Image: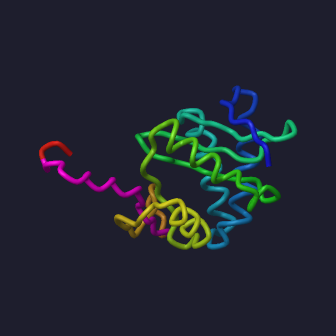
Amino acid sequence: MQINISQPQLSDYPALIDLWESSVRATHHFLREEDIDFYRPMVTAALPLLDVYYAESDSIIQGFIGLGDEMIQALFIHPQARGKGIGKQLMLFAINQKGMKRVDVNEQNTQALGFYERLGFEVTGRTELDGVGKPYPLLLMALPKPAPAEGDSPLNV
């Protein structure tokens, strides 16, 4: 699928929030309805504070990625666009163009965990609670540092 990656205008944010919710409902089966209601205003407030890029195809927003604090903070794909390479394209953009090397993922979201692992991310840690203290453990993931080239001294790496 051919996509364009762009930064949203303020007027695009309601569509991004709706996309977030439909994506969460399709992938985060461990969340309860009251959790989604709890997170929605937080996401609405936080999203404009991130460096956000969306993937568009045929004038329809298919997914978005949010970057901040030197890591990928959010990646959400419209349920009908899943499995079409959009998430991978957004991730490669974040890694190759923006230098992102870290991401956190809900431990219960095994599909996302596998997706990040296929892109080369490795689990480097775990938290018992999510970022707001809810009992949804996070796996901290990072791309491995490249191995030193032969002949490099540890001081040059």
Q: Is residue 129 left or right of residue 8?
A: left
Picture quadrant where residue 54 is located: top right
Majority secondary structure in the magenta region: loop
Q: Is residue 107 left or right of residue 26?
A: left
Q: Nearer the viewer, residue 148 or 118?
A: 148
Residue furthest out toward the front: 151
Q: Nearer the viewer, residue 92 or 11?
A: 92
Q: Quadrant of the C terminus?
A: top left
**Total label count?**
0
Q: List x then y, in percent, for residue 107.
A: 50, 71
Task: Tell me: residue 139, above or below residue 17.
Answer: below
Q: Is residue 40 left or right of residue 4?
A: left
Q: Is residue 152 left or right of residue 90?
A: left
- Residue at the spot 22% in from the left edge and 54% down from the top edge: 150
Q: List x then y, in percent, for residue 4.
A: 74, 36
- Residue at the spot 66% in from the left edge and 30% down from the top edge: 7
Picture quadrant where residue 6 is located: top right
- Residue at the spot 85% in from the left edge and 36% down from the top edge: 59
- Which stretch appears magenta? 136-154
Q: List x then y, in percent, for residue 12.
A: 75, 32
Q: List x then y, in percent, for residue 93.
A: 58, 41
Q: Is residue 77 magenta?
A: no
